């Protein structure tokens, strides 16, 4: 999956930090293969991650949103930005594009209006 340069740089910095932790723990390091782990390599409990996210949102002053809602936000924003539904579907890991279109159909009306305007501009250039 394609990632933007800022995310790639952040992941590279994290890999360096995790490598240092791995060296510090030596043979006690638990090599789970996960990207985000506790300092000893063991995985975080999902509730812990959700709580950290909840705290970060509260500290930011933004409206409350669950971590899983970020997935829906990503999909809706991507479709609204005109990213092809097949690409959005692949990024979400959906089995096929119809699942994406059925799930995120609420984002389609605005896209339909924009499409009508663009097509009209092609047919009736001013």
Image (cartoon, rainbow, N blue to C red):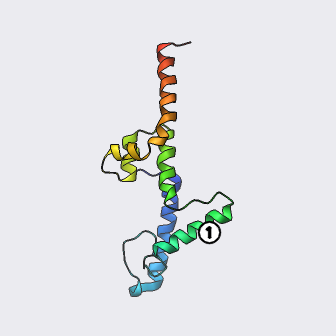
Up-down: is 67 above or below 122? below
Residue at position x 34%, y 51% from top? 94
Up-down: is 100 above or below 66? above
Observer able to see residue 1: no
Q: Position of residue 77 (x, y in %)?
A: 52, 45
Q: Position of residue 87 (x, y in %)?
A: 38, 44
Mark 1: secondary structure: helix
Location of the C terminus by quadrant is top right
Residue at position x 49%, y 34% from top? 109
Judging depth in this view, the residue of 43 and 77 nearest the camera is 77
Q: Which residue is mark 1?
A: 55
Up-down: is 12 above or below 18? above
Up-down: is 47 above or below 116? below
Residue 59 is drawn in which quadrant?
Answer: bottom right
Judging depth in this view, the residue of 89 and 5 nearest the camera is 89
Q: Is the residue marked by circle 1 packed among few (<14), some (14-19), or many (20+) residues within 10 Å?
A: few
Judging depth in this view, the residue of 56 and 69 nearest the camera is 69
Q: Position of residue 85 (x, y in %)?
A: 40, 41
Residue at position x 53%, y 54% from top? 6
How many labels were placed on the picture? 1
Name, please, the residue furthest toward the bottom.
28
Q: Is residue 73 left or right of residue 29?
A: right
Name, please, the residue furthest toward the left.
95
Residue at position x 52%, y 65% from top? 13
């Amino acid at each position: 999956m394609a990632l933007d340069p800022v995310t790639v740089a952040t992941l590279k910095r994290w890999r360096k930090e995790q490598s240092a932790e791995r060296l510090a723990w030596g043979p006690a390091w638990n090599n789970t293969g996960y990207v985000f782990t506790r300092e000893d390599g063991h995985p975080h409990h999902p509730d812990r991650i959700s709580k950290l996210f909840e705290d970060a949102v509260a500290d930011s002053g933004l409206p409350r949103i669950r971590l899983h809602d970020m997935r829906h936000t990503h999909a809706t924003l991507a479709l609204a930005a005109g990213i092809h539904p097949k690409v959005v579907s692949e990024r979400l890991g959906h089995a096929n594009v119809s699942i994406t279109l059925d799930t995120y159909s609420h984002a389609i009306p605005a896209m339909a209006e924009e499409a009508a305007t663009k097509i009209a501009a092609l047919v009736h250039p001013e």
